[in-house]
Image (cartoon, grey):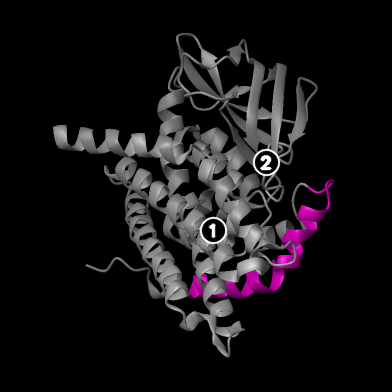
Amino acid sequence: MNFDFSDDQKFLRDEARKFLEAQCTSADVRAVLDDDAMSHNDEVWQKIVEMGWLGAAIPEEFGGLGLGMLELCVIAEELGRVLAPVPFGSSAYFFAEAIKLAGTEEQKAEFLPKVADGNIVGCLATTEGPGALTASSVQTVAKDGTLSGTKVPVTDGDIATHAAVLAKEGSGAGIYIVALDQDGVSRKALKTIEPTRSHAEIKFDGASATRLGDETGNGMTVLDQVMNRGAVLLAFEQLGGASRCLEMATEYAKERHAFGRPIGGNQAIKHKLADIYVKNEVARSNAYYGAWALSTDAAELPEAAAAARVAASEAFWFASKENIQTHGGMGFTWEVDCHLYYRRAKLLAVQAGSPAVWKEKLVSALEAKNAA
């Protein structure tokens, strides 16, 4: 059995890497970091839109490329390698997947083509602050086609044109699509450790909203499915970042000389690089398992998504930390790019649920599997 990507998917990966290395450089990432007025790099975003990647997993009948989830995983990994400062994940991993999973045919025809061509930038608005997210804890209320409440933090919430919002609906919860340019919506940008991926607080005050799909009270079920799919894609982003950290550390260890020899010849440095490699390979194995489950819609997806998310979060954080240590004093400076990867590692680790949340989901999935 072949668990690797196909030749066509590897070709897509290679071409995406060439494109991003040329069009999304460290300078493009730093442009957002250095300018408080920039929430993302719009020039890079428009180039990605032109490539059609937003529609990679959107069916052709709805304006996408119709390639599939494996191709989206490949693209996600390459975006993670360059720390792309764009709202790609919010639109393609979460908003579009919510529409695909739960939307009516009319909603798919209305929203998906606009996501694919970049006219809609979507986001997923679920959390309302610290604490576990449950149907009973949701305070945002849907009533008579309107929403009232506050969501914080919302990844790319200050950039997005539309949001998929989790709201209380009777005794359960539903997901509603809200246009964010209306009078009943106010937004405030939030400061985080990683300014190249923006976050916002969004307040709804009688904002017009449309329920996603026809079924009422199914919001938590749909959200769980969306999160599982998004977790695999985020894991590939994290894997891309972790892989680049290993490359950076290895390159520096070969070039930096101390006492007349490369520092990579020192056993302590060798062990650091070997430890990064091992964690990255564990993460890659779990990410590939997740990609298989995602692309085949397998029953193992909850288990595979949680495993991929936990392993990738650990690998990226560890790789970014050890990359700084390998660079020594230089690694702590603003001019060297190590801190860019450390920032992104810390941010992605808590996006869509912290490692602790996903560890709990993994345990629950394994218990359910063993009880079956």
Residue shown at the point (45%, 9%) measured from the top left: 171
Rendering quarter of residue 276: bottom left
Say which amino acid is labelled 1: Lys
Magenta highlight range: 11-38
Residue highlighted by disc 1 = 321
Residue shown at the point (67%, 35%) measured from the top left: 162
**Which quadrant is the N terminus positioned in?**
bottom left
Say which amino acid is labelled 2: Asp
Residue shown at the point (35%, 52%) measured from the top left: 290
Find residue 186 and report its horizontal and vertical position in percent.
Answer: 77, 25
Residue shown at the point (68%, 43%) measured from the top left: 120
Question: Could you classify mark 2 by the number of other residues whose Cα lies within 10 Å: few (under 14), some (14-19), or many (20 or more)?
Answer: many
| Mark 2: secondary structure | loop
Of pointers 1 and 2, the one earlier in the residue sequence: 2
Q: Which label belongs to residue 164?
A: none
Residue nearest the viewer, comparing 100 with 105:
100
Q: Which mark is nearer the camera, 1 or 2?
A: 1
Find residue 128 and report its horizontal and vertical position in percent.
Answer: 59, 23
